[in-house]
Amino acid sequence: MNFSVWITWETQRRNSELSKRFGAKRHVMDYSNRGALARYLICIWRTCRLLATRRPRVVFVQSPSIVLALLAVILKRLLSFKVAVDAHNIVIEQALSGKGAVSFIARTGLRWADWVIVSNNALRDSLAGISTNILVIPDPLPDISAGKSGLITRNREYPAVTLICSFASDEPIEDFILASRDCRLPHVLFITGSKKKAGDLLRYESESIRFTGYLAEADFESLISTSDILVDLTTRENCLVCGAYEALAVGVPCILSDTTALRETFPEGFVFTGNNTDDFARALERAIKDRNEMAKGMGQCRTVFEVRWASLFEVAKREIYPGGS
């Protein structure tokens, strides 16, 4: 029996889903409400105590935090366990930058790990000079079964288009809003994410462009489940956006940025667009026109995705648990 744990210093859906699939006991040490120093000291202490007392055979850690990954690969030499680092885009960018202490810590955590898990082939290829044992596992599809009431989208005359965003720097939100305003086909655009982070974009708010503010999980699931079209955009070439997985989970057609990583992972059932206003307008009009036909094809798309995901996961699981879990 390979007793394993999954440690994360933040709350994130991928940790929850993958830890269950690997049969690893998940430990969430989320102290984001504390100051930076206190947060790191508490998390380091709790991680050391957990690993020293439980003595797992395999330790999965999410990076970020790069400090958590570094701590794990240091402790493995003292406590005789193996480490799998689930490396997200930002950490890989930090490791490849080659600049300063942050890059050194990120690279060391990846280089000393027994396995590095990434979400797509492009990220795997970018790490070829750092790690020799890289496993590709996209996010599993989330289980979205709650919140079907449609309180936000109820009583509307036009199709509901939901732009899933957090107002991060890689999200071309304003360009899509402009495309939405100029679209020839009537619709209502709902934009998720905290209004505090929306800043000057709130000036576009109107009857047809609505900022939802931060939503509780059940309300968010209700919104995306009852939308006609979902949109999730990024300028990061190797980023697999959460909205794509969520669209497959609820069977709603989706518009995505046109990147190799997204096309490889979601080859059917999506509309891909360049990250500019003209392309956004064309993609939006196409999705509105074809939304019913696209919705019919989402079930087959989900089946293709899940078969491919299961194959990739089995490869990773056999590598990490060669004698069975």
Image (cartoon, rainbow, N blue to C red):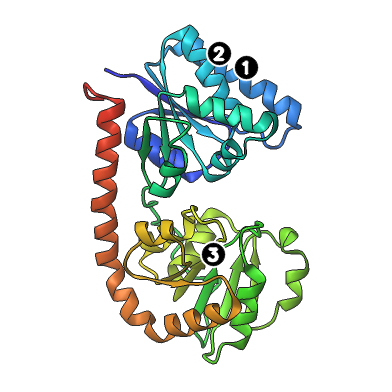
- Residue behind mark 1: 45
- Image height of 233 relative to 280, above or below: above
- Residue behind mark 2: 49
The amino acid type found where label 2 is placed reads Arg
Of all residues, the one furthest to the top in this rendering is 78
Q: Residue at x 44, y 30 (%)?
A: 131
| In contact (CB < 8 Å): disc 1 and disc 3 | no
- Image height of 149 relative to 136, above or below: below
Quote the CA–CA distance across marks 1 and 3.
38 Å
Quadrant where the C terminus sits is: top left
Mark 3 crowd level (few <14, some 14–19, many ≥20, 10 Å Cα): many
Q: Which of the 4 image quadrants contains residue 319?
A: top left
- Residue behind mark 3: 233
Residue 95 spot, x, y in % from top left: 57, 36
Residue 125 spot, x, y in % from top left: 42, 43
Quadrant where the N terminus sits is: top left
The amino acid type found where label 1 is placed reads Trp
Q: Of callouts 1 and 3, which one flags the residue occurring earlier in the amino acid sequence?
A: 1
Mark 2 lies on a secondary structure that is helix
Q: Can you tell which of label 2 and label 3 is closer to the viewer? A: 3
Q: Which of the 4 image quadrants contains residue 123?
A: top left
Residue 57 spot, x, y in % from top left: 37, 16
